[in-house]
Image (spheres, rainbow, N blue to C red):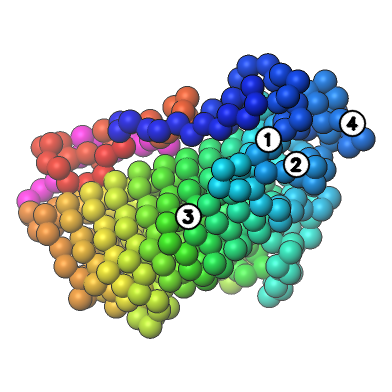
Amino acid sequence: MKSRKVLATVIGATAVTAGIITGIPSASAATTTLYVAVNGNDNNAGTLAAPLATIQKAIGLTSAGGTIAVRGGTYALTTNIQITKSGTAGAPITLTAYGAEKVIIDGEALGYTPGAVGSTIPRGERGAIHMEASYWRLAGLEIVHGPYGVYCAGCDNNTFERLVTRDNYETGFQLQGASANNLILDLDSYGNRDPRKNGESADGLGIKEGSGTGNVVRGARLWNNVDDGFDAWLFTSPITIRNSLAYGNGYNRWSIPNFSGDGNGFKLGGSGGTGPAAAHAVGDTFSWSNAAHGFTDNGNTGAITIDRSTAWKNAKTGFDVDGGSTTRLTANLAAGNATAVALGRSTAAGNSWNIGGTWTLSSTDASVITGGRAADGAIRSSNFLVPANGAAVGARI
């Protein structure tokens, strides 16, 4: 496994490393660290001994450079969490689980969970966590049953680390609008669905309908979502995706009537050959057992690059890049798909289908790569879908 940089923010005497708070806050640190607990009270001071009760109250009290540490438990929302104030480049705001404690933010009681068929979710109600702010770090939280899990619009320079967004009634994590320089690191997003749109909209992760350079997805696992694993619909700026995987997307596990889920692993833009020309870059990424394509340009007309990635046992095409793009495919592996590749105007070199022959895989056991993450949040390394002949083709994590 490649070495990984561990994000760390030091606030006073409290160190926040990969979402784990270590050390005992000093008196000076207490002024910038607020604690929230299920048995807290919003009239409390927000100290470890006298925590607040709601995350929203802590957001209202915090300021640039502050940390909100949430104790373990389930926080059942009656209104969604709104993040509209920003930190600064030198003093971002951190919202994190406390230590290794499990924090669940549950949006089941919110509106549009699910919405009526054909309804539109008002912008402000999108997301159990609704965010329009910059210079934040969210870490170690599990967001469930919301009208979207996390919805972030007009967001710059944020880090979203080790989040779980599952079983929401729209996309698990959606970044939208003018949003730049965001890092989505080690996200798990699964089981998201949207009965109100017959399953055509809820993805694991969407970076959609907007623009902004410098957005990076690394270490994401996107599975069993009703529509696509990842969707970059109408996003006009390049997105980088590395060391990620998508599987089992696009199947109607909820018996949604008039089902219309797509089922691509990675949908890299789109709009029928007339969409924006966004040069997304994908590498060391797996896509398997999806109901449609493993990777698709979906009408993106840009110069996408896909290298050292693997498409296996997808119901349609492994690498579907004939929708108008000029994708460059290098050293990728396609095995067991209905069709290996559809090139169109795209180019391919050093891929399994260029090399030819029979490709035997070292392992088709996904249990390590889909199982528990390493202590630092990384996907654990395995020989899943690695060519038995040792060729430098396909993904490695």
Asked which secondary structure carries label 2, the reply is loop
Say which residue label 3 marks: 181
Q: Taking 217 as reference, is 386 left or right? A: left
Most distant residue in the right direction: 43
The reply to whether discs 1 and 2 touch (Cβ–Cβ < 8 Å) is yes
The residue under label 1 is which amino acid type? Thr
Q: Residues within 10 Å of mark 3 (few under 14, many from 20)?
A: some
Q: Earlier in the sequence, mark 1 or mark 2?
A: 2
Q: Which region of the structure is painted magenta?
A: 357-370
Residue sitting at 61 percent across and 62 percent down? Answer: 153
Which residue is denoted by mark 1 in the rendering?
67
| Residue in view at x 47 percent, y 43 percent | 185
Quick check: is 367 in the magenta stretch?
yes
Is the N terminus in the top left, top right, bottom left or bottom right quadrant?
A: top left
Q: Residue at x 51, y 70 (%)?
A: 210
- Secondary-structure class at tag 3: loop
Q: Main secondary structure of the magenta part?
A: loop
